[in-house]
């Protein structure tokens, strides 16, 4: 029986698995190298199944704006769709990561070591929750799966017309995401192909998309623009004796799925179960399956987003496909040919 675990990384994955382990009586030392949680490049949307997992882990939710679904906009045409059940949250990452780490620190048996970089590896059971550039990829290698994609994110004040949906604009030069973060502020994130990437990509898209040109006339940037590349990551092996990978360290889908944090949170309890029972393979199978669904959804959405004006518009004209894709995104349906055909025929 494992009684002591070292968790490296205090993002959503590390904090969540520490809570799941601590509550089951396992002593956890959690290392987070930042001295206080900070903003990260992120779209900040927590999908409903991630919200459910958070509630199961902590018994409460952070004070953050709720969203009931998405609004897709392509070439001036838009369609809205609600999540099949539940609501999503928009979690500004500095606040959310701090909130979750505080929950971890308040969990019995969990010792949070903020501002402490973990450097050596040698403990009996390690959990790697140290993100896409995990130090443990030296032992369990990782490969970029979306080398041509770049992400940017920031916050603005003064954006008009944003209510209770995440808005997704498909544009020739990239996808732009808007979400309310509270107090009149909005998250703005953009995903680009490297060929059309520009440092001022967010400012560019806010002006290049006609609907936004009018709504963003008065915006002021309230946080710096953060960048991340490459976006996707595949990790073929997720466990080794005495080691388990979780969160982005275990593989990241292209953020077009908006699923990264939900993946981290929903895999925390299975990870804790596997560590306690010693059956790491069970976790590995489950997490790989979750990762494959997210990767397939990302591939489908990317194909749609690449051909602005064609497939993406066709998507908007097949309204049944939008809730189907949302069902897949929130892990209620598998993504396979049968699922897609049922929606389009
Ligand atoms: C542009 C973009 C948009 C995105 N949009 C969304 C979205 O809308 N919804 C969503 O759910 N996901 C989104 N994601 C993905 C999401 O940001 C990640 O999936 C999530 O941050 C993963 O959490 P994590 O805890 O695994 O890793 P991280 O949040 O990266 O945390 C890892 C932590 O480990 C710490 N660390 C690293 N090395 C060490 C060490 N040696 N010692 C101690 N600490 C260490 C780091 O400081 C960091 O705090 C997006 C990502 C990008 C790039």
Image (spheres, rainbow, N blue to C red):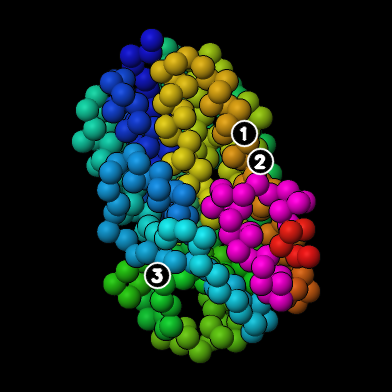
Give the mark toward the camera: 1 or 3: 1
Indicate the position of residue 304 as horizontal and vertical percent values: 73, 64
Was residue 323 drawn as part of the magenta stretch in this picture?
yes
Marks 3/2: CA distance? 29 Å
Marks 1/3: CA distance? 32 Å
- Of helix, strand and loop, which one carries label 1? helix
> According to the image, label 1 marks what residue?
288
Left or right, 54 with reference to 262: left
Queried on whether the Cβ of the residue with tag 1 lies below 8 angstroms from ligand 1, the answer reads no
Was residue 272 drawn as part of the magenta stretch in this picture?
no
Chain part drawn in magenta: 315-340
Left or right, 11 with reference to 332: left
Q: Height in image: 214 above or below 194?
A: below
> According to the image, label 2 marks what residue?
292
Marks 2/1: CA distance? 6 Å
Specify few, some or many for label 1: CA neighbours under 10 Å numbering under 14, 14-19, or 20 or more. some
> According to the image, label 3 marks what residue?
180
Question: Mark 3 vs mark 2: which is more N-terminal?
Answer: 3
| Picture residue at 47% right of the left edge, 58% below the top | 85
Left or right, 306 with reference to 24: right
Q: Quadrant of the image for the N terminus?
A: top left
Q: Height in image: 199 above or below 129?
A: below
Along the line of sight, the residue nearer the viewer: 204 or 211: 211
Indicate the position of residue 97 as horizontal and vertical percent values: 34, 47
| Picture residue at 56% right of the left edge, 65% below the top | 190
């Amino acid at each position: 029986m494992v009684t002591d675990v070292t968790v490296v990384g205090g993002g959503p994955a590390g904090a969540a698995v520490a809570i799941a382990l601590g509550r089951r009586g396992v002593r956890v030392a959690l290392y987070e190298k930042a001295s206080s949680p900070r903003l990260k490049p992120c779209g900040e949307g927590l999908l409903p199944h991630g919200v459910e997992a958070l509630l199961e882990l902590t018994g409460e939710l952070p004070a953050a704006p709720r969203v009931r679904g998405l609004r897709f906009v392509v070439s001036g045409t838009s369609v809205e769709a609600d999540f099949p059940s539940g609501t999503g949250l928009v979690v500004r990452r500095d606040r959310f990561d701090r909130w979750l780490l505080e929950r971890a620190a308040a969990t019995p048996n969990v010792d949070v070591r903020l501002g402490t970089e973990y450097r050596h590896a040698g403990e009996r059971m390690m959990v790697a929750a140290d993100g896409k550039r995990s130090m443990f990829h030296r032992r369990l290698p990782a490969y970029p799966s979306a080398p041509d994609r770049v992400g940017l994110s920031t916050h603005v004040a003064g954006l008009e017309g944003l209510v209770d949906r995440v808005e997704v604009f498909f544009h020739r030069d990239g996808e732009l995401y808007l979400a309310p973060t509270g107090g009149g502020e909005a998250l703005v994130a953009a995903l680009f192909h490297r060929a059309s990437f520009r440092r001022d990509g967010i400012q560019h898209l806010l002006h290049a998309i006609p609907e936004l040109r009018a709504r963003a006339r008065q915006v002021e940037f309230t946080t710096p623009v953060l960048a991340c590349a490459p976006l996707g990551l595949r990790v073929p092996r997720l466990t080794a004796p005495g080691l388990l990978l979780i969160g982005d360290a275990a593989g990241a889908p292209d953020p077009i799925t908006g699923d990264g944090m939900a993946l981290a949170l929903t895999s925390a309890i299975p990870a804790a179960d596997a560590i306690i029972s010693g059956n790491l393979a069970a976790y590995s199978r489950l997490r790989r399956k979750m990762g494959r669904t997210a990767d397939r959804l990302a591939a489908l959405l990317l194909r749609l987003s690449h051909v602005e004006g064609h497939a993406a518009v066709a998507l908007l004209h097949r309204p049944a496909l939008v809730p189907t894709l949302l069902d897949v995104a929130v892990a209620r349906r598998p993504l396979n040919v049968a699922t897609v055909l049922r929606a389009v025929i």
